[in-house]
Image (cartoon, grey):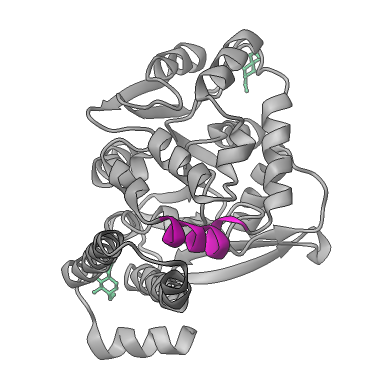
Amino acid sequence: MKSITRICFKLFRLPLSSLQFILRSMLALTLSVYRTAVRLLLRDWMLRLASPLVRLLISGFEFLLILNFRLSNLSSRKIWLNGGGTVMHFWVPTKLKPGQPTLILIHGFGGSSLWQFFIQVWHLSRRVNLYVPDLLFFGNSYSDKTDRSDDFQARCVVEGMKKLGENRFNVARISYGGYVTYKIAEMYPNEVEKIVIVSSGICYTEEQKNEHLEKLGKSPKDFLVPQNPQDLRHLLDLSMYRANWLKMLPGFFLQHAIDAVLKENGKQKKEILEYLINREPVPEHGNLSRETLIIWGDRDSVFPVKYAYELQRYLKPKAKVQVINGAGHALNFDAPIAMNKHIISFLQN
Ligand SMILES: *[C@@H]1O[C@H](CO)[C@@H](O)[C@H](O)[C@H]1NC(C)=O
Ligand SMILES: *[C@@H]1O[C@H](CO)[C@@H](O)[C@H](O)[C@H]1NC(C)=O
């Protein structure tokens, strides 16, 4: 895979616009195939016939995602921790840019960093030294330990960074468990410079939590580790506002995506969620001395935007809020470039 990517990279040196064009065309193609298929009232045997095609399409798409990361001058590194029982996978800068800020960009629940940040890495990595880890049990990271806590994830990210030779960095985190970011900042005050928390309600009381879970309608364990197209549609519907059309992808396509990307380590992911849901509420007052930027979409229906201001009150005095209008929870899909711009200007100030 690696060498093929390198050859493609060398041969074509595709500019971003053509890459995006290819990605868009592939999606458009899939959608139009779907519409035609529905019109023709596809039979079961036809779907089965289409199945290898879909698998090929998803593998091809993943290949383009990897190519996109490589064209963004990132390379794939695995770091072994805890005496070899834990492996953290990072995308790291191929060449460090002196004088530019170092940023760890951490993904949320859902696919790996490859799938969550493919729109953002090109733009971001030109302006910062970008490190993109897969959290444990996502993408290519794994641990044989039974610890499912935020502290453990936080420790593994930071220990990985140290092994990569980085001792001072900024941290940006999207969605579930911005608490990992908070934890990193709390546990490693000497290493962390600034933090960015995106769409992540980290401080709520027991009451707020129960109200929140009730409003989501389904147990997060059911749709955050989706097993079938309905679960995934629920997740897409909940987390996206502009990119909401993704839920219209055909069921068999979504099922393949689940099998290929989302189902991995399902048991451990559910344990992580279990831990999150049952975790003690955070302390009454935060005590974060780092400058913090909170970014939120005003159409977020997972954590409504009021949580942004609650978080700001909690983290004061050094936190500011940046709301992006017309975007939902998954800002990495709904407003990736706006999110990048806010992060970059915050880090460069
Ligand atoms: C990647 O590195 C090459 C060569 O140093 C440079 O020309 C190109 O602009 C870089 N691309 C990005 C996205 O940073
Ligand atoms: C906040 O953190 C600082 C330094 O990390 C510490 O000296 C101080 O006691 C803490 N305050 C509270 C209320 O925990």
Can residue 80 be seen here? The reply is yes
Foreground residue among 187 and 134: 134
Residue 111 position within the rendered picture, expressed as x and y whole percent measured from the top left: 51, 54
Residue 346 in magenta? no
Say which residue appears at 27% left-offset and 56% top-offset: 123
Which quarter of the picture shows residue 86? bottom right
Q: Is residue 65 above or below residue 82?
A: below
Which x, y percent locates residue 74?
41, 68
Q: Is 16 on the left or on the right of 215, as rendered?
A: left
Residue 97 point in image, percent of width and height: 35, 63
**Most common secondary structure along the magenta stretch:** helix
Residue 253 percent coordinates (x, y): 42, 62
Occupied quadrant, residue 325: top left
Using the image as rendered, state which of residue 293 and residue 237 is in the foreground.
237
Per the rendered image, the range of residues in magenta is 251-263
Q: Quadrant of the C terminus?
A: top left
